[in-house]
Amino acid sequence: MGRFGRHSAVISSDDVRNFCVLEHYYSVPYNAIAEKIKAKMSLEEFQEMWEDAFNAVVKDFDMKLAKLWDDMLKKIQKDGFHVEAGQSGGLTTAEILTSYVEFGYEDVSCIKHSFNSLYEMANSNSEALRRLIKKFDKQTGMMTQSVRMLPRLYGASFTIGQEYLASIMDSLDLLLVDADDDDLSIGSTKSIASNNDTTAQMADELEWLRDNASKEMTKEDLESIVAHRGFHNNNDQIHNRPLENTLSSFEQIWTAGISLCECDIAMTRDGKIVMAHDETFERLALIEGSDINAKSVSDLTLRELLSLNLKSGNRPPLLIDCLRSAVTIGDHAKLVIEVKPGNKEIVNPLVQLFQKHEVMLNHVAVVMSFDAIVIQRVKAQFKEAFSEPFSGPRDRRSLGVRSGNSLMQMRAMYRSSQRLLQTNQVIEEGKADVYRKPEVKNRRKYIESVSYALGDLAFGNEAPDLPYFLLLTQVAPSDKFYSVSVKDLSPLFDVVRKYDIDGVYIEYEPEMLDPNYQQSIIELSEFCKVGVWMFAHLHPDCISICRRLRNECGVSFVNTDYVPDFFWK
């Protein structure tokens, strides 16, 4: 089977079809016709098979496209959309898409994927039919079929409709961005500090952090000590510190000049990546006994997430919310992201997020997991997506993103440049720890400068620096996770090689600083990247231990909860 034959077979396979809206796509039987051409089929037989395939593609494409619009129109009509008085009917595609997104349907991403799947099949079928013409003419040594059939192919609905579908998908992307920025901007997840900065305890804690960061921490401390779930209270209290994994918990660390915040991510049912450590939000929820609190994060929708108030009064932030803050605060602000074991479904959306907003990748230092298979997959997909230098929009069709410079993409590029100028102006005129938003007269047309200052498309001549991909381990024996002790770290060398990862993030043990065992962690640190995690309730969480691990053992990252006596133990 030739290269395109294999590609065609993959494109038509079930694993890339979208069954949210459309049930089945017709695929040109490229390999069957190609084999007959190779066996010197007659002109009449070729014309008949090609015409049959061409007509089937036209019929299937037109029917599927009409069904997509029909489904959307019926839904918005059913849910109360009416043409305003004085306006005529005959809604434009833009009006339909805008209405559909603004109604907030949970299947918007499903509709977008259906458009994308139709685009992929139209593109694949168009290319298959073109290649068959080329193959037959090459076999006969004449161009008769090219002259006869190519005009029909290039004028067919499924060929000229590809750019149309690309513009529809770009429109959906921009509408979803606008909707996210309206509903999910930094303003809608206000930091606790901005709400409670008059309370003495909050002010004292923040002053304590900033004063010690500037006076007691060296440059090496600021770049290697990781704030575990941000600056938070280990007892889930909010009287003096922000709640864990919230915007304010990260922002207070970053604006103090400290670089690294560890966070935990999960994915909602409709594909949003949210900050969440536990399987549910019961521990952190403001209102006890709510059905939403008891739901698994993976079963929540974005709409449900917006209605979920944490003890701080804020909703749980999305990963992109926190990355927007990092971009605004400065180059030093970075996340150490933990992916929960078994969460393979989050890998593609995570890569897609950074492909769409590539500059955000500069604000991720580490991606880690207790699951070796998951972290192996994460690294492999990041390498595939970002390892090759490129110029212009990357071809990202394998992840459901179109390539090429459509009108919508060029508009997006212009909008991105304008947002970047706005953000630069805000940063230059403001202070490092003050966020100011320019006056906005038309909120729907203005995207918060913080949100996408980095652009809707990624450009550049060099591939971005990737984060380190590390495997988390623990000391206690476990059937689920890798268990190792500093007394014998030799298995980790094989693990790093086997899974082709960058290193490990191991649990702290006092023996790490014992001369009898210290050499083993030094050798591991020379072989790969090593981080050490600690819990304040279990381990001696203090700056002196962090420094010894870094300076004596070669460790790159050390977690801390910034306990009250962190600087003085």
Image: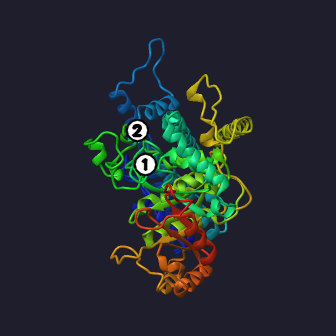
From mark 2 to mark 1, how far is it between C-alphas? 39 Å
Mark 1: secondary structure: helix
116 or 353, which lies in front?
Answer: 353
Residue 388 locus on image (x, y percent): 67, 65
Q: Position of residue 294 (x, y in %)?
A: 28, 48
Q: Earlier in the sequence, mark 2 or mark 1?
A: 1
- Whether residue 165 appears in this view of the structure is no
Query: Which disc number belongs to residue 22?
Result: none
- Image-based side of 416 in relation to 205, left or right: right
Find disc 2 in the rendering and name its residue: 306
How would you rate the neighbour count of disc 2 (Cα within 10 Å): few for under 14, some for 14-19, many for 20 or more? some
**348, 98: nearer the viewer:** 348
Lateral position of residue 221 relative to residue 231, left or right: right
Label 1 packing within 10 angstroms: few (<14), some (14-19), many (20+):
some
Task: State how the image is colored.
Answer: rainbow
**Which amino acid, by three-letter code, is at mark 2?**
Leu
Between disc 2 and disc 1, the foreground one is 2
Residue in front for this viewpoint, 420 or 50: 420
Q: Position of residue 478 (x, y in %)?
A: 34, 76
- Place of residue 384 in the rendered image (x, y in percent of width and height, measured from the top left): 58, 66
Instruction: Residue lying at the far top in this picture: please name it.
Output: 86
Kind of residue indicated by mark 1: Asp
Q: Which residue is mark 1?
A: 60
Secondary structure under tag 2 reads: helix
Q: In this orientation, which residue lies closer to the viewer: 209 or 124? A: 209
* Rendered position, 476 above or below 90: below
Q: Is residue 224 visible?
A: yes
Q: Residue furthest front?
A: 568
